[in-house]
Amino acid sequence: MSDKVDLWALSDLATPWCLRVAVTLGVAEHLARGITKIDDLAREADCDAESLARVLRHLVGKGVFEEPAEGEFALNETARDLVDPGPVRGNLDLDGWGGRVAGVWSGLLSTVRTGRPSYQEVFGRPYWEDLDAEPGLAASYDAQMTNGGRNVPDPAALVGDDWADVRHVVDVGGGAGALLAETLRAHPHVRGTLVDLPRTVARSGEIFEAAGVSDRASVSGQSFFDPLPRGADVYLLTRLLLDWPDEEAAALLTRCAEAAAPHGRVVVDGGVSPGGAPPKGGLMVMMLTGGRTRNLDQFGALAAMAGLAVTASGNAPSGRYIVECRPA
């Protein structure tokens, strides 16, 4: 059996862009409401019927949607995943944050040539400045982080599941608080503080209330590069460090070390891989912000710069790799 890879199949751009266009036009939702004929679908989506039909037939050929009769389309099992709001739709919707993520790939060559993020070249402003300048884009980003990005649905994990002596957790860059809410619900003796930008933590109240933890949750609307609330037992950084180059990542870890001293722990979940092998992934953050994934050796050197020592590491029950540090 040949191990040769089909390079043409690897280079196909038609399928990912057709899928994103179908999601942005709400095709799956229209089909779920019983609008199945192409002229009616195009009218609802405010687009050209012939062009939409060609896009949908391409997707039918790839196993997304069905065409049971000419000019009439239907959901199949795969397409049903596109009906409900969630991380899949959020990543594919070209009218929101997903559009920025898709568009920035056109800057990959520039990033590889220069070693610098290409987001500004593609969209006219650096990534974080763009979020600050576009409230709709920022809201889309926050929603995506809550629905399926940084704030994973499981509670926060510690190496060895050692929660007995934890009384106060600070979730640094915790978005709208979904992860912190699940953590407090799983550990009724713990109280928590959510740290993120004011526009982001403003959405946390309903999440804490729905989880039944409002009486044990507080917020600090601020940059996490400013001094953090001091004296907590655990400072959580979930899928946060990989957004930043080494200089900013070291500054963030330094703030955590200052706040955690003398006895607190800094827990990093995401963006660090075991051992010293070259880390994989991180291409998107490379283009967005200049961020990167790191192996444990690289992270340990970064932590030492911030006054932290790695004290434990291991896999959470979900399989996520966790690293714990304490002030050196």
Image (cartoon, rainbow, N blue to C red):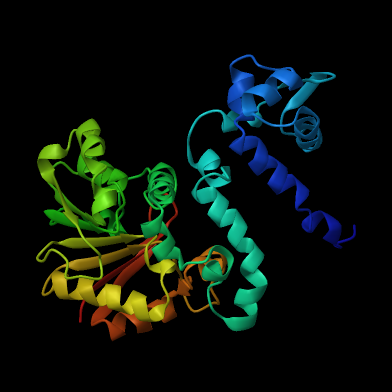
In the displayed structure, 225 sits above or below 6; it is below
The outermost residue toward the top is 34
In the displayed structure, 2 sits above or below 68; it is below
Picture quadrant where residue 77 is located: top right
In the displayed structure, 317 sits above or below 28; it is below
The outermost residue toward the right is 1
Picture quadrant where residue 171 is located: bottom left
Picture quadrant where residue 297 is located: bottom left
Q: In terms of depth relative to the viewer, which is nearer, 162 or 54?
A: 54
Residue 13 image offset from top left, x and y in percent: 75, 53
Looking at the image, residue 93 sits to the left or right of residue 265; the answer is right
Looking at the image, residue 20 sits to the left or right of residue 85; the answer is right
Residue 264 image offset from top left, x and y in percent: 15, 68
Location of the N terminus (image quadrant): bottom right
Residue 220 image offset from top left, x and y in percent: 17, 56
Q: Evaluate whether residue 230 shows in this view.
A: yes
Location of the C terminus (image quadrant): bottom left
Q: Evaluate whether residue 75 shows in this view.
A: no
* Count of labels in the image: 0
Task: Please tell me which residue is depicted at 23% across the width and 45% down the height of the picture.
Answer: 202
Q: In terms of depth relative to the viewer, which is nearer, 316 or 300?
A: 300
Task: Please tell me which residue is depicted at 50% across the width and 46% down the height of the picture.
Answer: 96
Residue 115 image offset from top left, x and y in percent: 57, 81
Task: Please tell me which residue is depicted at 87% across the width and 63% down the height of the picture.
Answer: 4
Q: In terms of depth relative to the viewer, which is nearer, 240 or 40?
A: 40
Task: Please tell me which residue is depicted at 12% across the width and 57% down the height of the picture.
Answer: 165
Q: In terms of depth relative to the viewer, which is nearer, 47 or 179?
A: 47
Looking at the image, residue 318 sits to the left or right of residue 268; the answer is right
